[in-house]
Amino acid sequence: MKEDLIRYAAALPKAELHLHIEGSLEPELMFQLAQRNKVEIPFNSVEEIRAAYSFSNLQEFLDIYYQGMSVLLTEEDFFDLTMAYLNRAAADNVKHVEIFFDPQGHTDRSVPFDTAISGILTALRLSRVQFGITAKLIMCFLRHLPEDAAFETLKQAEPWLDQIVGVGLDSSEVGYPPSNFARVFAAAGKHGLKRVAHAGEEGPPDYVWEALDTLHIDRLDHGNRALEDKKLVERLAAEEMTLTVCPLSNLKLCVVDDVRNHPIKKMLDLGLRATVNSDDPAYFGGYVMDNFEAIIENLDLTREDIKMLASNSFAGSFLEPGEKRAHLAAINLVN
Ligand code: ADE
Ligand code: ZN
């Protein structure tokens, strides 16, 4: 029965809407790039790297995540990283991706904005022909840094704005409320960029309200803690706000203590537009289908729930209405 549902989920076309490309850096590639670029990393083997991936909160993960990025130096590195992710996504029958990147994680260690984005975009351009996947790029601001630094990043992005679909907000959440970034998000909106933000991962429901009311988000990343506030749930449902939910990430970062207690089924039952995503798959133990498998194994999801999760991923994407309709029609063809 569960196997049938997993087979069904695997056969469905899916979109991935919450994926940090730097979080798809597998230990094998990290090791290879460290050698290629002669970068010292504090690990002697792939096994040692994997063994270090045990976290009790978001910050413990972020410390390792920023350290891991240190091996990414050249355009080719960013290209290789992105191609490796697309290859994995294709294996999971992902047909469309909207990926995040963290420019400040690179510019702050003297890797130019243009180097990072060029390598990523070259891979994304190849994506349709090589993997049958369409792709969009979202540039995130690191919220533990000041808003001035986000403005500087937006300036660096100006020559590339026709190839960036939107801006996001990520990194350490508690203590860094969304309203700190209201002005830079408004400026991004004036450029015609979509707006998304991590909120309610570790932070309180107030941060989700702020993301809605001060950042004017088009999509909510995580949103787990919104469930603590009935009025907020009603608003998110009424506005058909898409939530990019990341079950294995939530488990690894101790946002939930057990997948059996993951709220994604409850979110669907409350009428929220939840989707399934991998966040930082190299660090959290899996890609999109690993996340589907985990929730199917541990929650009482129905076939309709699985279909809804896949449909939501296209409905909540930044694809054009006609493209969304085509993907939704393809979902209906899967038995
Ligand atoms: N950056 C990469 N992954 C993240 C997450 N899950 N939350 C906040 N910032 C991140
Ligand atoms: Zn994330």
Image (cartoon, rainbow, N blue to C red):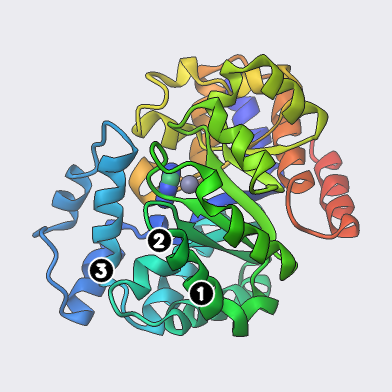
> Could you tell me the amino acid type at mark 1?
Ile
Q: Which residue is mark 1?
A: 120
The residue carrying mark 2 is 22
**For mark 2, does the 10 Å Cα neighbourhood hold few (<14), some (14 to 19), or many (20 or more) residues?**
many
**Cα distance between the residues tagged 2 and 3:** 10 Å
Task: Judge whether 13 appears above or below 45 on screen.
Answer: above
Query: Whole-percent x and y of residue 188?
Result: 65, 65
On the image, the x and y values in percent for residue 270 come to: 72, 18
Is residue 133 visible in the rendered image? The answer is: no
Q: Residues within 10 Å of mark 1 (few under 14, many from 20)?
A: many
Q: Which residue position is annotated with label 3?
A: 70
Judge from the rendering whether residue 175 lies leftward or rightward of residue 247; answer left or right.
left
Task: Give the numbered dot on residue 190.
Answer: none
Residue 237 quadrant? top right
Q: Secondary structure at mark 3?
A: helix
Between disc 1 and disc 2, whose residue precedes? Answer: 2
Tell me, yes or no, whether the two marked residues, 3 and 1, touch with CB atoms within 8 Å.
Answer: no
